[in-house]
Amino acid sequence: LMTTAALLGVDACPMEGINPTEYDNVLGLNGSGYKTVVALALGIVLGRVRRYAKLVVDRVFFRSKYHADTALKTFARRVGHIENTSRLLETAVSEISRHTDAPGVAMYARQNGVWQRIRKTGEVGFPAQLENDDAALVAIRTEQAPVDLAGTASELGEEACMFPMLVLGELQGAIVCANRPGEHYSKDEKTLLLEVSNAIGTAWRILIGRDNEAYVRVMATGELTPEIAREKARTLMAV
């Protein structure tokens, strides 16, 4: 019984010093052919019950959210195996938009001293460029965590949340998700989206390194003319 209780997550504790006769009287066992041998207390910690109940409620009543969260976690795990940079970035904004129901998602990266919008989905009018010291960028550089833009004097407006794409503590880029109508992202959603954005940033940084290495290798062999080399360099910078 104690082994089964442990497997079910139920606490069990045998008790000593009991009076079997009194137990038999209380339980009405006299003349039944049964008698008290041992007393075993069973119980469930309230916190464990609460966590289990929350899990059941989430899976039953918020099934779509549960599946969306699972899909984003799966994408974060697999994104490092996408081998084309453009496909990686396009898929990233598409998957985030699809599984969060965000009315707009944009990705920004620093190019030539300003932050360029390099990918976008949805109808939200995110600006094509952000100054390096835009309030939202200053906030994520400082916090290295998701930043709710409410009350932030950013060109992105206030109805969005920005997620840093961190690689070894360095800001690789940023993803902006517009708020759903009348709703801000929850703490759990921010934690999950930060995990996803960091996975995207890491995968992107690896692809950049791979492409740069291939470019240098070809340059070293003299296979590229200066004109083709410049064009290739511009392509790498444009992502």
Image (cartoon, rainbow, N blue to C red):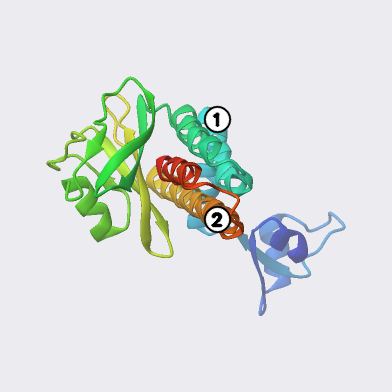
In the picture, the quarter occupied by the C terminus is: top left
Q: Is residue 134 visible?
A: yes
Front position among marks 2 and 1: 2
- What residue is shown with label 1? 63
The three-letter amino acid code for the residue at tag 2 is Met
Q: Is residue 56 visible?
A: no
At label 1, which amino acid type do we have?
Answer: Arg
> Residue 182 appears at what percent x and percent y?
26, 26
Circle 2: element type: helix
Residue 138, given in percent of the width and then of the height, sits at 20, 53
- N-terminal of the two: label 2 or label 1? 1
Q: Which residue is mark 2?
A: 219
Return the mark for residue 143.
none
Say which of 70 and 141 sits in front.
141
> Is residue 171 found left or right of 46 in the rendered image?
left
Q: Report which quarter residue 122 is drawn in.
A: top left
* Contact flag, marks 2 and 1 (Cβ < 8 Å): no
Q: Is residue 119 left or right of residue 159?
A: right
Residue at point 30% right, 43% down?
Answer: 162
Q: Position of residue 105 (x, y in %)?
A: 37, 31
* Residue 176 shown left or right of residue 87 in the figure: left
Q: Is residue 3 above or below residue 212?
A: below
